[in-house]
Image: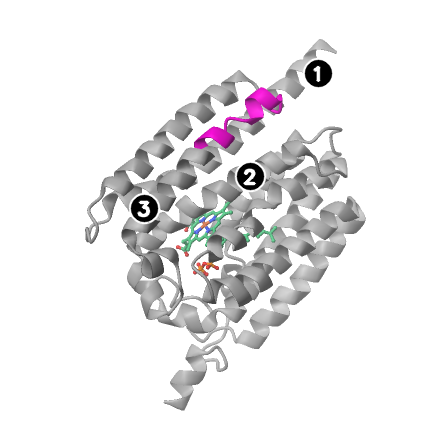
Amino acid sequence: MALVHNIENGEARISEAMPGDYFALLKPRVMSLVVFTAFVGMILAPGGINPLIAAIAILAIAVGAGASGALNMWYDADIDAVMTRTAKRPIPSGRVTRGEALAFGLTLSVLSVLTLGTLTNWIAGGLLAFTIFFYAVIYTMWLKRSTPQNIVIGGAAGAFPPMIGWAAASGTISLESVVLFLIIFLWTPPHFWALALFKLRDYDMANVPMLPNVAGERHTKLQILAYSLVLAVVAAAPWPMGLAGPVYGLIAIGLGANFVRHAISVWRMEDGDATMVPAKKLFRFSLYYLATLFAVLLGERLFEIAHSAQVA
Ligand code: HEM
Ligand SMILES: CC(C)=CCC/C(C)=C/CC/C(C)=C/COP(=O)(O)OP(=O)(O)O
């Protein structure tokens, strides 16, 4: 019994770790989109950036993002052991100990911040350090277990990457990069609460105060709709601001309308609906939405760069 307890708390090992376990600590699937938004911020920033420096800077941001994932798994090992979605992660399965994950996360955090700061500038390095701190300490260690607003405030961590990329290329924080931040900040609650609606039991079992199990389904659905409406408007802002052109503007409006349509379906879903189909659809669409929005921003800017090179 004591051994089971120790394994569940990440204090004992039951089998050797494979390199893949350390890779899993980096939360690679989630972080791939995070890193992509940082890359887009970097390309959109004024001034341009040397391609080799850009490549190393992106690698540093990816390592920093992964490090924050490892720190999250170090602290949350008890919660992860209880939830079906996370029970097979390297710590609760006894292949990596909590101490190893902590050392891994801290080492990568320091390396990534030092690399980005010295290679580009300390606004970017400082923002990366702050983001890692925000996710690991403010969200994971504090808000996640204490308030149903955890992902609204803590979600800011996931919104910083385009600002980090922007700062790495330009050495500045500007209104345009804050708008990119705002888009992800407003996107996070519907993205996560849609998932939390159909994973309600997991969070109940783990005693994590996510909005659906504290305030109920109806309230969560209304909040999802409210955030989606504001998101749809703010996501179009790069067009009138001159950060993006009409192609982006029209696609952002179309995608935003679809996002709101999905949110309305969630809102209209009967409380207690066991299938949760509209919530699952909204969660999936949220990933497609953010990836497409940033891909179009990138595509437009690359087209502009190629066009001006041709003219010159
Ligand atoms: C506090 C903020 C956030 C929370 C609480 C959250 C939570 C989650 C959770 C619980 C999952 C399911 C992951 C799994 O199956 O293990 C997920 C999936 C995902 N999230 Fe988020 N997320 C947040 C912010 C973000 C941000 C900022 C991005 C990217 C910009 C992002 C991108 C993704 C992606 C790409 C997936 C799908 C991963 C897969 O295919 O397995 N998330 N998110
Ligand atoms: C550059 C840099 C440092 C970026 C960090 C970006 C960041 C904070 C992403 C957060 C996304 C994420 C995996 C949330 C999961 O919440 P959770 O930990 O509650 O989910 P879980 O239950 O799957 O562990």
Is residue 84 at least partly visible in the picture?
no
Q: CA distance from mark 3 to mark 2?
A: 21 Å
Q: Nearer the viewer, mark 1 or mark 2?
A: 2
Residue that carries the numbered disc 1 in the rendered image: 309
Of the residues under marks 3 and 2, which one precedes in the sequence?
2
Q: Quadrant of the N terminus?
A: bottom left
Instruction: Mark 1 and mark 2 in contact? Answer it, CB < 8 Å.
Output: no
Q: Label 3's element?
A: helix
The kind of residue on which mark 3 rests is Lys
Q: Nearer the viewer, residue 12 or 243?
A: 243
Q: Residues within 10 Å of mark 1 (few under 14, many from 20)?
A: few
The spot of residue 88 in percent (x, y) is: 39, 67
The kind of residue on which mark 2 rests is Leu
Of the residues under marks 1 and 3, which one precedes in the sequence?
3
The spot of residue 246 in percent (x, y) is: 52, 16
- In the rendered structure, find residue 182 and report the number of the disc placed on it: 2
Residue placed at 47% from the left, 54% from the top?
Answer: 151
Instruction: Mark 3 and mark 2 in contact? Answer it, CB < 8 Å.
Output: no
Q: Which residues are magenta?
A: 232-244
Residue placed at 46% from the left, 41% from the top?
Answer: 187
The kind of residue on which mark 1 rests is Ala
Q: CA distance from mark 1 to mark 2?
A: 31 Å
> Is 296 drawn above or below residue 265 in the view shown?
above
Within the magenta stretch, is there residue 234?
A: yes
Q: Quadrant of the C terminus?
A: top right
Q: Label 1's element?
A: helix
The spot of residue 103 in percent (x, y) is: 63, 71
> Is 260 drawn above or below residue 153 in the view shown?
above
Report the residue that reaches farthest toward the top: 311
Q: Quadrant of residue 69?
A: bottom right
Residue that carries the numbered disc 3 in the rendered image: 221
